[in-house]
Image (spheres, grey):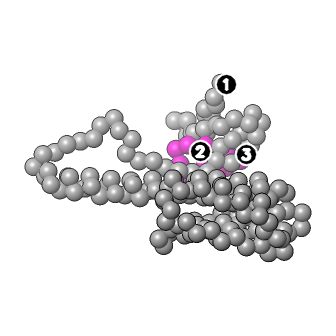
């Protein structure tokens, strides 16, 4: 693990260097010791900006966060990087699993098997806070079966869907 810390308009003190090294240790569980980290810290206006790049055998993960507290920006960067790494590892594992399933299917062409009661597809999407009226507009734009959003009135996750009459809408909202 190689860590390079650079400061632009801001001096990278020993405390900051130790903090970055301590936080980067969280990434060891994903790659072992085989990765490089480049951290750049700088100050713009009233905010401290932490930028981190992780290079792992050709794969590059990047996070940039601005915060009033530099340590909070570093924490957020590490969280973002961990999310990106987990997502990529899951994607690669899924691709490898799918490839191996295809090989098994080809090998057993005489035996037909169907997968039942299994999750076979996962979709990821971003949910944003918005009013119900805005969610209706988004649902009509996308022409999907449903639209998930955070209701700004209740601050809860809601699912908006079009009813069978194709004129009205329904909302699913948690009780708790």
Whether residue 168 is visible, yes or no, is no
Image spot of residue 27 (x, y percent) = 56, 56
Provide the residue designation for mark 1: 176
Tell which circle, 2 or 1, labels the residue nearer the N-terminal end: 2
Query: Magenta: predominant secondary structure element?
Result: helix
Taking the spot 16% from the left edge, 45% from the top edge, the residue there is 112
Rendered residue at 46%/56% (across/down): 89
Work out which quarter of the rendered image holds the C terminus and state it: top right
* Residue under pointer 2: 147
Outermost residue toward the front in this view: 14
The picture quadrant where one finds residue 93 is bottom left
Residue 130 numbered tag: 3
Q: Is residue 5 magenta?
A: no
Mark 2: few/some/many CA within 10 Å (<14, 14-19, 20+)? some
Region in magenta: 133-148
Residue 25 shown left or right of residue 10 in the figure: left
Q: Is residue 146 magenta?
A: yes
Which badge, 2 or 3, comes first in the chain's sequence? 3
């Amino acid at each position: 693990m190689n860590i390079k810390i650079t400061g632009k308009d801001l001096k990278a003190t020993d405390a900051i260097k130790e903090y970055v090294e301590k936080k980067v240790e969280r990434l060891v569980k994903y790659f072992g010791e085989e990765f490089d980290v480049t951290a750049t810290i700088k100050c713009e206006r009233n905010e401290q900006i932490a930028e981190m790049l992780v290079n792992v055998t050709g794969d590059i993960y990047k996070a940039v966060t601005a915060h009033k507290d530099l340590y909070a920006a570093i924490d957020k960067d590490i969280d973002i990087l961990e999310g990106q790494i987990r997502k990529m590892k899951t994607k690669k594992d899924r691709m490898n699993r799918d490839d191996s399933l295809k090989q098994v299917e080809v090998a057993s062409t005489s035996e037909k098997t169907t997968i039942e009661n299994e999750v076979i597809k996962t979709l990821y999407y971003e949910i944003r806070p918005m009013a119900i009226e805005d969610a209706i507009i988004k649902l009509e734009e996308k022409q999907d079966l449903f639209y998930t959003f955070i209701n700004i009135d209740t601050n809860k996750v809601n699912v908006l869907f079009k009813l069978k009459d194709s004129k009205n809408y329904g909302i699913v909202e948690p009780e708790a």
